[in-house]
Image: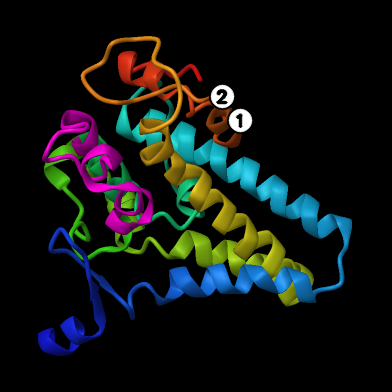
Amino acid sequence: MASVARAWSIPLPNGSRISVIMSLPFALVHLASLLIFFIPFHWYYLVTCLALLGVRMFFVTAGYHRYFSHRAFKTSRVFQFVIAFMAMSSAQKGVLWWAAHHRHHRRHSDQELDLHSPTLFGFFWSHVGWIMSDKYNDTRLNYIGDFAKYPELRWLNKYHMVPPVVLGAALWLIGDWHLFIWGFCLSTVLLWHDTFTINSLSHLFGTRRYETTDTSKNNWFLALLTLGEGWHNNHHHFMASARQ
């Protein structure tokens, strides 16, 4: 089985491999989003797409990033679950997986052990390669023990496809496959790449207000796309701040 999996994978210069089979859903969502050009246009398709992009971006930045990765604010256990579920509707893997890997990145930012430094490993790896590869599939529980103690979060992390599947199914039932293409596929692709620019472009283009030990930069355009995450140099200087 290992030899078969290896045969159906793409080798990368750093020794990692991208599984063709495991990356198929990622590729198919991208391809499906192109179907918008073959669907009769309705304004509510576009409104749904942009609304879900904005709402889910909020939960990615406020949930995955500011709350679970940096504990920048406090909330109840119930709303903690809501934040996790909504953030995971972005299809960016589990909440514990996301936050643990981000904490590791922050500890080793732009150093040899960094997960996705564009200055060390190139744009493709920092943007999508690292998350598609087989190198970081496991959740680094030693980095996220404070939240891993909650069984409901461990369940969500294990079954991380539940939130995006629920969202996709709801859109299909409300407005058939047309709304699914606009509201889920296109919205998710835009959300993915908006989020990924913070790992890649915000370490390459922009200005530096603070002298940090990494290459983080502030970029107003990326800040617009990500509800403030583009002020990346500010964040690297004030990691625990919830302000965007």
The residue lying toward the viewer, choosing from 55 and 117, is 117
Query: Is residue 118 in the magenta section?
Result: yes
Measured as percent of width and height from the top left, residue 203 is found at 36, 32
Q: Left or right? Give the position of 82 relative to 2.
A: right
Q: Determine the image quadrant of residue 186.
A: bottom right
Residue named by callout 2: 220
Q: Is residue 70 above or below residue 46?
A: above
Inspect the image, locate mark 1, and give the three-letter code of the amino acid beneath it.
Leu
Q: Which residues are magenta?
A: 104-130
Percent across and percent down for residue 33 are 63, 68
**Which residue occupies 20% across, 53% down?**
139
Residue 77 shows in this picture? no
- Identify residue type, mark 2: Trp
Give left or right: position of 145 versus 124.
left
Gap between marks 1 and 2 measured at Cα: 6 Å
Number of on-image labels:
2
- How many other residues sit within 10 Å of disc 1, few (<14), some (14-19) or many (≥20)? few
Tag 2: Cα neighbours inside 10 Å, few (<14), some, or many (≥20)?
A: some
What is the number of the mark on residue 140?
none
Q: Is residue 144 above or below residue 46?
A: above
Mark nearer the viewer, 1 or 2: 2
Q: Position of residue 59 (x, y in %)?
A: 51, 39
Image coordinates of residue 164 in percent, x first then y, are 51, 62
Q: Secondary structure at mark 1?
A: helix
Vertical relation: 116 (above or below) 219: below
Residue identified by numbered label 1: 224
Residue at the spot 19% in from the left edge and 86% down from the top edge: 7
- Which of the two residues, 97 or 125, is positioned nearer the viewer here? 125
Q: Furthest residue to the top?
A: 210
